[in-house]
Amino acid sequence: MLAELSIDDLVLIARARLQFAAGLNVITGETGAGKTLLAQAIGLLLGQKGDEDLIRPGASRALVQALFESGDESLAVARELPRGGRSRAHLDGLLSSAAAIEEALRTRIAFYGELEHTRLLQLERQLDILDAAEPQVIAPLAAEYGEAFAKAQGRARELDRLREEGRDRAREIDLLEFQVDEIEAAQVEPGEDGRVAQERERLRHAGKLLERVGGALSLLSGDRESAALDGLRAAQRLLSEASALDPTLDVLAGRTDALSAEAEDVAISLRDYVDALDADPAHRDALELRHDKLQALKRKYGGSADEVLTYLAEAQQRLAALHQFEADEGELATGVAVAQAAAVAAAGRLSEARERVAPGFARRVAEELRKLAMPHAAFAVELRRRGEGWDALGARGAEDAEFLFSANPGVPPRPLRDTASGGELSRAVLAMRSIVTLGNDVETLIFDEVDTGIGGVTATALGERLARLAATTQIICITHLPQVVAYADRHFAIAKQTDAVAGTTETLVSELDGGARVDEICRMLGTAPDDQAARRHAEQLLQRAAAPR
């Protein structure tokens, strides 16, 4: 609740400290005394713009501070308007922004008056009030819808993300499919690039190789008399014969025999090499093409044939994953459609319940308004659907609620936000809050001009309703009615003090109790404080208000 309001140098208020009670607090004063200055002070805390015109003449700055208490927690806020500078806001002693303070106070205080922006006029807030009229009916359906809507939104966002990535994914799939096809079509084998390069190099020097290998083969086993293999064979035969005469030559004979066999094997290998050294131009061209193909693949996908094959395996794996994404997208799209259909169905059930609740709520509000000196008041709730299907849904359902109001007979109800004056709006809020419990939506309600056009028995009814509401919510009411004042738990009076000699005017705020309170009620009744009949009437008002209800 708002525990204390402190005002320094705001217009005509030099200094004021108001400590509010938890129940009904009233503020009274003569017309022009400056009651609206309190409204301006609270408006500054709620983020309204302020300029140097609000600074008391001769002061360097205007300062408004407020202390809110809720259980063991407290919140201190301040708004300062320096002369010749920009306004400053403080939250718990630290520099802040007006917007941050407004947000911090959003669930603590609501101001209902002619000039103030009110939460009631927001369509979303009107839907809240309608739903609170029959919470046992609406709350379960609203919770069911909220869960279904959030689920559908989450799946839709996931699908949108997947589809947003789809264009990039499609391009990647096309590229990978091309790359995989290119490598697979080449039928690359492990280590192939080394073998092809080696064969290519051999064929490029086929002439020199034939000359040199052929010469070596000719020297080893050619037709010449000096062929090495023939000489080795002859030496092997002679040593074999000699070893028969001298056994000590067996080892040398064996070694010569091994040399002869090795030389013969080398000769065979050289002959095979010469026979295999193909100088066919067609084969050489094919080998060059294969070499170029492998080089091109290596430039794209790796430094060797083995690396190209590794890239192929990775590309195939990535391609499979991307195709799985496409399958997932189809499944997710189906899931989104199912979730959205469930949300649409839940919204339909919630809409039907609101349609049932709205007429009864409107009748009850109209009855309350008639009890608050608005005998011709008409009130209705218009539920406007935004369309059909998923696209029509919002966080609160498929429709908006608009309160329609008319204060005069023969005038059809129009939107409350367009037609109601400050006093009418305040009474409409009071009427709705008399029959609707909104939980802990706000801790403090401030009413300005709620009593415009009210008097007599209706004034007493207004006081009773404010007192009843103040049992659960702190109320601060700027009023002209003594019948409302009589129900107050705390009473503040505002008076204007003028010093003609000094040429100054100042607004003073004081808390009243006891006899001073009776004096103020007498003034509000239009009599002097020493009028005994008026004093008895004032005392009777206080006694009646204090009686058990």
Image (spheres, rainbow, N blue to C red):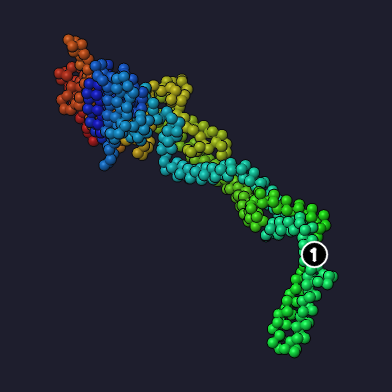
Indicate the position of residue 331 as horizontal and vertical percent values: 60, 49
Q: Quadrant of residue 270?
A: bottom right
Q: Can residue 299 be seen by looking at this rendering?
A: yes
Front position in the image: 428 or 95? 95
Apparent side of residue 67 relative to residue 518 in the rendered image (left or right): right
The residue lying toward the viewer, choosing from 238 and 162, is: 238
**Foreground of the two, 155 or 418:** 155
Location of residue 125 with respect to 526 vertically, above or below: below
User: Percent position (x, y) of residue 533?
Assistant: 17, 20
Tell me the residue at 79%/58% (across/down).
207
Q: Position of residue 455 (x, y in %)?
A: 30, 22
Which residue appears at 39% of the width and 21% of the height?
Answer: 421
Q: Is residue 360 visible?
A: no
Tag 1: amino acid: Gly
Q: Nearer the viewer, residue 90 or 71?
A: 90
- Residue found farthest to the right: 223
Q: Is residue 346 left or right of residue 334?
A: left
On screen, 299 above or below 97? below
- Please identify the quarter of the rendering in which residue 493 is found: top left
Residue that badge 1 annotates: 214
Hey, which residue is sitting farthest top in the picture? 501
Q: Quadrant of the C terminus?
A: top left
Report the side of 368 relative to 264 (left or right): left
Residue at 20 percent across and 16 percent down: it is 497
| Secondary element type, mark 1 | helix
Residue density around tag 1, few if under 14, some if 14–19, many if 20 or more, within 10 Å: some
Quadrant assignment for the N terminus: top left
- Which x, y percent locates residue 447? 32, 27
Figure label count: 1
Which quadrant of the structure image shows residue 206? bottom right
